[in-house]
Each structure stands twice: as structure tokens, then as C-alpha cells.
Amino acid sequence: MKRIVFVLLLALGILACVTAQTVYYKDQATLQWDPVTVDAAGDPFLPTDLVRYEVYIYDYIAGVVDPQDPAQLISVGIVELSEALIVFPYRTSWAAGVRTMVTDAGANTDYSDIAWSYVATDAGPAGPFLYIPFPTLRAPLNLRDSGM
């Protein structure tokens, strides 16, 4: 029985190492993703469809109750390109997310789920990641000779 528990704990430890997240230390980052050109059924968007992306971040340490609820997230903005510049408001671990929004010719808008940087299936081959901004440092003050 002890061997089984040991093997299970070892397997969990290896799994935790394999699914570890990369941390990028940046005060600001340009998040990129593959453009969405088809709907969930695989059908291409119509030429009259306007495809945009909503970009969000949240404090990964503090967490949120529902990472799919935009009301609980910090909006970075809406972009038409498949990249967005993110400037982090304070120092913590930040998760970055993007969702597709498509507006048709009749002004009807539909939204995808939010894809998150810390979710392996959303991050793709590069693997899951978080951002941590560098601290803003003060220069030393009152420089002087020791007198010796």
C-alpha cells in the first residue's frame, strides 16, 4: 500500500513539473495569437463579418471566481489585429486572455470563450505562461564618502 501511495505521489510530482508555467518578466508585453477565420463549426466568416478581439488580464495570485466573466477581469481593450500591447498596472502574476467577437452585417455580435495564457490547450506548443512585471526601483539617495 505504501508503494502505491509513493508511486502516485511521484507521478503527481512529475505531472506538476511537466505542466509548469513559464513566467515572463516584463513591465509590458505584446500578446499575440492566431487569427480566428472560421466559426466553431469550421465555416469561414462572411466578408461582411467584423472580427475583433477583446483582451483581458487578471491578478493570477488573487484569482477570480469565474475567469470567463468579463466583469471580474481587467479589460486591456478591443483590437482588430491578432496582437495587443499590455501594460501591467502593478506587480503581481498576471494571466492574459483573449476572446473573439464577431459582428455580422445586421449588427449582431457573438463572443467566444476567453482563451487564457495559463491554460495549456489555449497557449499551444509554447506552453502555458504568466507575466510578472519588474519592480520599479528607486536609486539610492544621500551618497557620501565614509570619511575613512
Image (tube, rainbow, N blue to C red):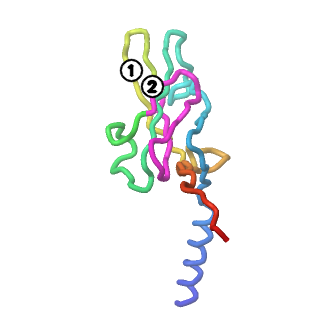
Closest to the observer: 66 or 132?
132
Q: Which residue is drawn at 55% across and 22% down?
A: 43
In the rendered image, residue 28, in percent from the top left (x then y), is placed at: 56, 39
Is residue 97 something that shows in the picture?
A: yes
The label number, if any, that marks residue 109 in the structure image:
1
Q: Residue at x 56, y 20 (%)?
A: 44
Distance between the alpha carbons at the discs numbered 1 and 2? 7 Å
In the rendered image, residue 56, in percent from the top left (x then y), is placed at: 45, 37
In the rendered image, residue 146, in percent from the top left (x then y), is placed at: 63, 67
What kind of residue is marked 1? Thr
What kind of residue is marked 2? Met
Closest to the observer: 86 or 55?
86
Q: Which of marks 1 and 2 is nearer the N terminus?
A: 2
Closest to the observer: 147 or 19?
147
Q: In which quarter of the image is the C terminus?
A: bottom right
Q: Does the magenta stretch include residue 88?
A: yes
Instruction: Give left or right: position of 79 versus 25.
Output: left
Answer yes or no: do the residues labelled 1 and 2 have beta carbons within 8 Å? yes
Q: Residue at x 45, y 25 (%)?
A: 101
Q: Does the magenta stretch include residue 96?
A: yes
Region of the chain picked out in magenta, as a range:
76-100
Query: Mark 2: few, some, or many residues within 10 Å (few <14, many ≥20)?
Result: many
Q: Which residue is drawn at 58% across and 88% down?
A: 3
Q: Name the residue under label 2.
A: 101
**Numbered disc 2: secondary structure:** strand
Location of residue 83 by image quarter: top right
Location of residue 143 by image quarter: bottom right
**Numbered disc 1: secondary structure:** strand
Location of residue 72 by image quarter: top left
The label number, if any, that marks residue 98 in the structure image:
none
Residue 30, compared with residue 122, is above or below; it is: above
